[in-house]
Image (tube, rainbow, N blue to C red):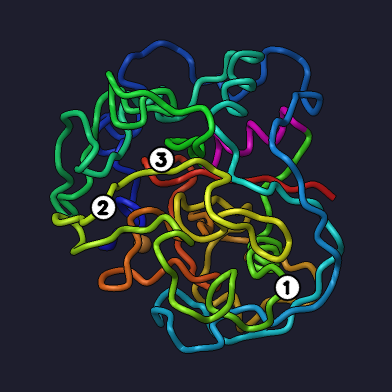
Amino acid sequence: MNCCTPGHDGPAHARAGAGGAAPNGSGKNDSHTNSSGTNGSGTHLVRQAVIPGGEFAMGDAHGDGYRADGELPVHRVTLRPFMIDRTAVTVAAFRTFVDATGYVTDAERFGSSAVFHSYAEGGVPLPEAPWWRTVDGATWRFPGGPGTVAVADHPVVHVSHADALAYCMWTGRDLPTEAQWEYAARGGLEGARYPWGDRHPRPQQIDIFTGTFPWEPTGPVGTVPADAHAPNGFGLHQTVGNVWEWCCDRYSARYYSRSPSADPTGPDRGNSRVLRGGSHLCHDSYCYRYRVSARSHSTPDSSASNIGFRTVTA
Ligand SMILES: [Cu+2]
């Protein structure tokens, strides 16, 4: 268990919501179908960066990572040019999508989502990671639970991989491949730990946990505006810290040893999807995953208060 996601083995809301069935029985199980008939034409409010095609060394050049995460071997990857969001998709951008389509997220269907204890409104601690709480009514609109408010310019959270794909379908975009994500996150620096180089972050560079995880923070805990902190060399904000970001790839810890070198798209099989970038809960005393090569993963219907996404287009 770690700070990254409430469970690699299954979403918190699957346990809370009777094996994943929608507890309200509302018959909204077809909510992933866009009712507006405007697939691909939705307004995407997030500014873009142009990423030139090129070659880079993907993986952990420093030996910093957790062996089980599969950040090794470092391998050469070439990518075609693409455009990527300069920030994570914001609450305001996601609201535009929901207002236009009536989309219902997985967390809304399940009736609960995972919230970090320090800003949770009520909820039930997860036995194996009690700093996570399963909170009824925690959704992208109410990130700490009912009574809390999602801030327009913060990254949207409590969105599952499926929710992120639905947003992409509406806007005619895609989730980044894991390789696209890492290439963009590096901002043109070869083999560096962080988007700005190898130097350990100062507080004004990143939104991560400070203090002793998980019970004794020494600063605010939670998301910050998606464009806070200086951008990297490609103009991207917060590729590390703030929220984990879904990639389109399926996850395998062994993938790097057999990845094709040109435009890799991940393994063909596996249920978990890749998460990148770490979140406001990462800290070097506990979970050193706010590096550009760090990897995590979760099941595609999982949601939590520290998981969001950004999008790409060719
Ligand atoms: Cu972490």
Q: Nearer the viewer, residue 196 or 125?
A: 196
Q: Position of residue 121 (x, y in %)?
A: 20, 29
Instruction: Single out the mark in the foreground, 3 or 2.
Output: 2
As displayed, is residue 70 above or below residue 232? below
Residue 237: where, in percent of width, then height?
60, 53
How far apart are labels 3 and 2 at the CA level?
24 Å
Q: Position of residue 152 (x, y in %)?
A: 51, 27
Q: Which residues are magenta?
A: 161-171
Cβ–Cβ under 8 Å for marks 2 and 1 = no
Contact check, label 3 and label 1, Cβ < 8 Å? no
| Quadrant in which ligand 1 is drawn | bottom left
Residue for badge 2: 219
Q: Which mark is residue 303?
A: 3
Residue at the disc numbered 1: 188
Judge the density around disc 2: few (<14), some (14-19), many (≥20) Cα neighbours within 10 Å.
few
Q: Count residues near mark 1 (Cα–Cα under 10 Å), then give few for <14, some for 14-19, many for 20+.
A: some
Q: Earlier in the sequence, mark 3 or mark 1?
A: 1
